[in-house]
Image (cartoon, grey):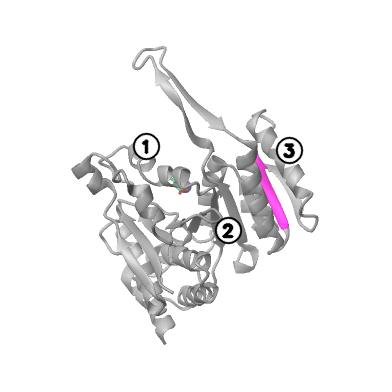
Amino acid sequence: MTHRIAVLPGDGVGPEVVVEARRVVDALGLGVEWTELPWGSAWYHEHGAMMPEDALDVLSAHDAVLMGAIGDPTVPDHVTLWGSILAIRQRLDLWANVRPARLLPGVPCPLVGRGPEHVDMLFVRENTEGEYAGVGGRSHRGLASEVALETSVFTRSGVERVVRYAFGLAAGRRAILTSATKSNASRFGYVLWDEVVEEVAAEFPGVRVERVLVDALAARMVRDPAGLDVVVASNLFGDVLTDLAAAIQGGMGMAASANVAPGAVGLFEPVHGSAPDIAGHGVANPCGAIWSAALMLEHLGEAEAAARVIDALEAVCREGPRTRDIGGDAGTGEVGAAVAARLVA
Ligand code: IPM
Ligand code: MN
């Protein structure tokens, strides 16, 4: 069976890490057909839009999407991102953003005295509504009375589906689900969220659920990450917590993500962004992109291939070569080649 993958290398270091993820997948010898799409900031300068009008149809005609990163200093971020990844997540209804935060052996952890045995968290971030609903507006521009509204939108169905998904993942792991809100200060959306968590918990008697305020959870992640298994959070809280989680697992270069929903074409991307400061130097860490490709394979039903990629990635992190952000001096291509070599051998 051939898997048809749309590739969105994008901007900055995106193309550099995506090429390594592709090299690793190709080394598996599966039937994979790549369609490279040139959308991104350069496309924007040429066409006045981040993607063509039929972009979502094009993506939906594939089995999965592998993305690098979008963002360039020459275009305002809210333009590039609402013209690409945020629109894709919302319009393809990819309502779960799954982000493993596991510290691999050999990768330095910034927390004193913590090692791989302490860091194995899985974040499930609501991915289409909440604080990223895109609802709001501005008026009285430039006047002292200027107003900007950014409205969070929480729907019962939207919260319920992502919370239930997170419970399901927790049930298959260490059976602890931590739900992060801020329902002491924000009285509507997060209170609804807490209520839905209580309700869905009844379907999963084997999972211990805890409700934690997001500020307290940030402190706990640093103090005692070992006590956390699956964390479910709103769009913005999930965004912030997963940068912290990435730092704990060795840095942004290590972090992977899956934008998914049952039955939908998933989009898989490293969490690090376009990193224009190091783009073009061949030093970006491809591990997050390679890990994202493993998540993609799993989603495509290639669980065994996915496990082989993770094994190879772990071996390379343990034995090197490593990029400089995780204590080595190798380039992006050397790391990608080393992971790929372990798969053909
Ligand atoms: C992420 C990124 C995006 C987000 C940005 C680029 C819009 O930070 O995937 O975590 O906030 O979702
Ligand atoms: Mn982020």
In the rendered view, does 241 fall on the left or right side of 223? left
Read off the residue under disc 2.
111
Nearer the observer, disc 3 or disc 2? 3
Q: What residue is drawn where x is 38% and y is 63%?
A: 5
Read off the residue under disc 1.
78
Read off the residue under disc 3.
195
Nearer the observer, disc 1 or disc 2? 1
Which type of secondary structure does the marked residue at label 3 adopt? helix
Mark-to-mark CA distance, 1 and 3: 32 Å
Mark-to-mark CA distance, 3 and 2: 34 Å
The correct choice, above or below, for 83 with respect to 115 in the image is above
Q: Quadrant of the C terminus?
A: bottom left
Which of marks 2 and 3 precedes in the sequence? Answer: 2
Q: Which mark is residue 278?
A: none
Mark-to-mark CA distance, 1 and 2: 33 Å
Q: In the image, which residues are magenta?
A: 176-181
Q: Nearer the viewer, residue 44 or 118?
A: 44
